[in-house]
Image (spheres, rainbow, N blue to C red):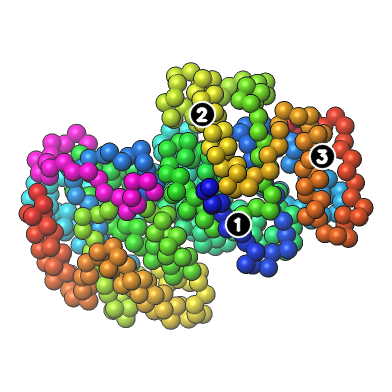
Amino acid sequence: MSQEIHKGITKRPIRWYGNHSNHGIPYLNDVEIKGKLIVIEGPDASGRSTQIERITAKLEADGYAVLNTGLKRSELIGSGILEAKRNVSLGKKTLALFYAADFADQLEHKIIPALQAGYIVLADRYIFTLMARNSVRGISRAWSHDLFSFCTIPDLVFYIDVDPYKLVHRVFEKRMSLDYYESGADLGLSDDMFESFMIYQRRLAREFNKMKEKYGLILVDGNKNTDEVNASLQTQIDLFLSNNP
Amino acid sequence: MVPSSLKSYKRFQVPGKLIVVEGIDGSGKSTQIRLLEKWLRYNQVEVFKTEWNSSELVKEITSKGKKKGSLTPITFSLLHATDFADRYERNILPLLRAGYFVLADRYAYTAFARDVTRGCSQKWVRKVYGFAAKPDVTFYFRVPIDVAIDRILAGRPKLKYYEAGMDLDLSKDPYESYRIFQSRIIEQYESMSSPEGFTVIDATLGIKEQQKIMREKIIKLMPQNISKQVIMEIPRNEPRNP
């Protein structure tokens, strides 16, 4: 990351979900960052990737250095998770910890260094998806919260909320079938894959709504068309960046 | 006093017993748990033995990360927790519920000692392992650092990078690094010993003597119908390492 950064030069201490004595990374306590961490959360087919592409293009045009990151993409574990997913006999806590390890790898090797270098990190989902999936699978919210206390608090977190009926149609537009995990099929909710998808997505949405207050998630109405959603996201991001140079 | 970090699993119907051995490398705990396993089997107790960092799922990733040298204290800790959770959810808890004697060669306490030494937060590591049941008995093998190091180096002269704690920048010399790293782990074990209720075994005693102390403790956990005819004999010439 040797690129010259022109914007975002104000240094500030990094913020963690856990406090100094109980977050997981005491050895990074004194890290100072110049960049911003912006997170887009939302279900599969909610239009996240399109939005991230557009926002990235706009921010780069405005002169910012942008780094895109997402879940299950770490060099360490990325492919391991795909293999583990096929192994249905994996326990819920095992999978939760596996994802947390993958996330930690990205946080320490990608996100934090980029923030130190002054990048705007645009994250295609963050710990909130992982926590929502855990809760829906019966894992205690308190445990997930403590588990992820090693994570950096983002500057902005958007949650693209889409009605499950609308969502299912968008999934079918993309590919004519429902994904096993995105339908929560591992939970045995229903033999009917469509019904399983609906129940699962509703439960996830409920978890996101519960997290809204606690973690300051900004709700975006994802039922609107791509341009409208984009305008809403971009306006809020631009406003934030002009107020927090 | 710091309270124990792990909760009792008695809220489940758990007829089995969880027996753990802890201590630094070279403390002789693996030899002892193997003898205990043989003895329990001989006395017709249903036994399952599980070892730290042995789940197939995680092994490959951990060794890949080690080769690349990209593991951080947090990822290292979370990968070990994943390995533990896999064995816990798949084997340890179901077998305990079925009435097995589960013997664990290292348990969550190993993470508490090593991960904190590596720089993770003490509170955080304990919360991550919060789902693990408190063992019925935890034997802690207390050994002077020199004795342990002599035993380890006699077996394998070359220390591996992470094994020696080289990632902590304690010393450029792997042997010196290993000594400092292991001493710090001992400090962690010692501070846990009383709040976690460890049964301390003097690991400088003879193999038979240590085993006798363990068996006397475990015999009290065994079902009544078995304990009447338990044989305490310890085989001679038990090799130290397989």
The disc numbered 2 marks a residue on which chain? B
Tag of residue B133: 1
| Residue A200 quadrant | bottom left
Left or right: where does residue B213 sit relative to residue B190? right
The disc numbered 1 marks a residue on which chain? B
Tag of residue B181: 2
Tell me whether the residue at label 2 lies in contact with that at label 3, contact meaning CB atoms closer than 8 angstroms.
no
Magenta segment boundaries in residue numbering: A1-22
Q: Which quadrant of the figure contains the N terminus of chain A? A: top left
Tag of residue B212: 3
Report how far apart the C-alphas of labels 2 and 1 lie in the structure.
Answer: 28 Å
Please name whichever residue, A93 or A5, is drawn nearer the observer in this view of the structure. A93
**Which secondary structure class fits the magenta region best?**
loop
Mark 2 vs 1, N-terminal side:
1
Report how far apart the C-alphas of labels 2 and 3 lie in the structure.
Answer: 31 Å
Is residue A226 visible in the rendered image? The answer is yes
Report how far apart the C-alphas of labels 1 and 3 lie in the structure.
Answer: 26 Å
* Placement of A196 over or under A84, stated as above or below: below
Name the kind of residue labelled 1 in the image.
Ala
Mark 2, other Cα within 10 Å: few <14 / some 14–19 / many ≥20: many
- SS of the residue under disc 1: loop
- SS of the residue under disc 3: helix
* Placement of A7 over or under A59, stated as above or below: above
* Placement of B33 over or under A103, stated as above or below: above
